[in-house]
Amino acid sequence: MFTNDNTECSTKISVISQSKFDKWLLTQSSFTKNWALSNNFKAESGKILKIPYEDGRLKEVILGEGADKNLEAICAFSASNIGNYYISSKFAKSKESEIYKAWAWGNYNYQSKSKKNLLYVKEQKELEFLTFYSDCINFSRDLINSPANKLNPSTYYSKIKNNNLFKSFNFIDYTEKEINSNFPLTCAVGKSSSSKPKVIEITNRKLSKKDKPLVIIGKGVTFDTGGVNIKPGTSMRNMKKDMGGSAIAISLFLLANYFLKKTKIILIAPIAENAISSKSMRPGDVYSSVSGKSVEIAHTDAEGRLLLADAIEKASSYNPCMIIDFATLTGAARVALGEDLPAYFCNNETFAKKIENLNKEKLRCWRLPLYSPYLSKIKSQVADLSNASLDGMAGSITAALFLQEFLKSPNIPWFHFDTFAWSQVSKGAALQGLDIMSDFLRKNFN
């Protein structure tokens, strides 16, 4: 995938921004100018132009970046071509490091080795990071793409426990009894399945009572039927991806540990299957969290927030410096923002402004408000909270407000990402929210 051996047979790839296309064109030979113009290439997003030598051999590849740093073309080229290449980013807006990452995304194959192409990277340190980055995202994407009859709570836990990426970390192994007592809302969801709930909890270093760790949380529903409020068939088709939040959290945990040499980090991912059986939770049932907060089940397909509520209460018990969670939580967020742009919520203005500064460089997520008047939508007459509002409005906001209620203190900085974890283009796993949060941690948290 990447190499620092730049052989003479490597082919040049030039990434061109639309705003710099005219400048690039002025520097080219008559042959290249005519070839680009006759192929109607103007550096639009996703456009790929192969320029030949006069004898027909490939001389150079030109990739359009569009006006907004769109690296779709580098992903597509990496996915469908073999050979050895090197990057020229002189006329690109994107940083070279972002181009390398896009190459890694395109190079992915489910549960198999990368394609037979290599991209030259000059610096050894950069090469080492890109190799690690590729291992992280490929592992997470494999998890999301795995069929639910292969990836259940038990096998999911085993895949993490036995993977070399986690060999230096400390696992907290919960017994079934301990999961029942420490993650009761997760168990309310998972009791419907023959595969019992599990909890992935990992620390990168040993913790003391004085520590204020960074805690990263992910929703891990290995398959979501919707429960007795069953989903329509088309909505259920890709619900193997409903553990996508946990897969994103896993990659962020690994990358954060790579960047943040002094930070103590905890990963918490409750894992359950929302199946249908005589043991399934029902609308109107009431369950209590560890803290004693009672929840009435208004809708069994609003199950992911129950896993996150358990995890947030557990995270709060560690006196964290910050909590970040990821979940494929609501269709409302996708209706509002589509598949590529995750919604995020934050209760800390200082940290939210840092995300917005990153968004000014390249838009990668969109903030929605924690609008407290909507708490009335999830009131219950028989419990402290209802797990869902049934009026069809502000579904992503009410879900976030529900989660916020499980923070031990409003002073704990908290990010919640309502993401998709899927690509409508490739029809496979995606990790929306990962890169902007890894950039945020690397730049602001060490």
Image (cartoon, helix red, strand yellow):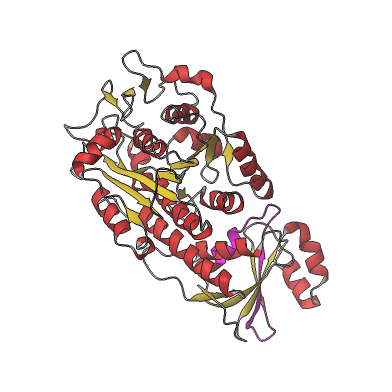
Magenta-drawn stretch contains 62: yes
Q: Quadrant of residue 63?
A: bottom right
In this view of the protein, which residue sits in the foreground, 176 or 374? 176
Residue 231 is covered by the magenta coloring: no
Visible residue check, residue 192: yes
Q: Is residue 82 above or below residue 196?
A: below
Q: In the rendered image, is residue 275 in sight? A: no
Relative side of 417 to 14, left or right: left
Q: Residue at x 24, y 35 (%)?
A: 181
Query: Up-down: is 155 above or below 400?
Result: below
Question: Can you say whether 426 is above or below 116 in the image?
Answer: above
Q: Which span is picked out in magenta?
A: 52-77
User: Quadrant of the rendered structure where residue 53 is?
Assistant: bottom right
Tell me residue 38's x, y (percent). Answer: 73, 68
In screen coordinates, is 324 left or right of 277? Answer: right
Q: Quadrant of residue 83?
A: bottom right
Looking at this view, is 173 or 434 the one in front? 173
Relative image position of residue 382 (x, y in whole percent):
31, 14
Which residue is found at the position 46% from the left and 72% from the top? 115
Residue at the location (45% across, 57% down)? 254
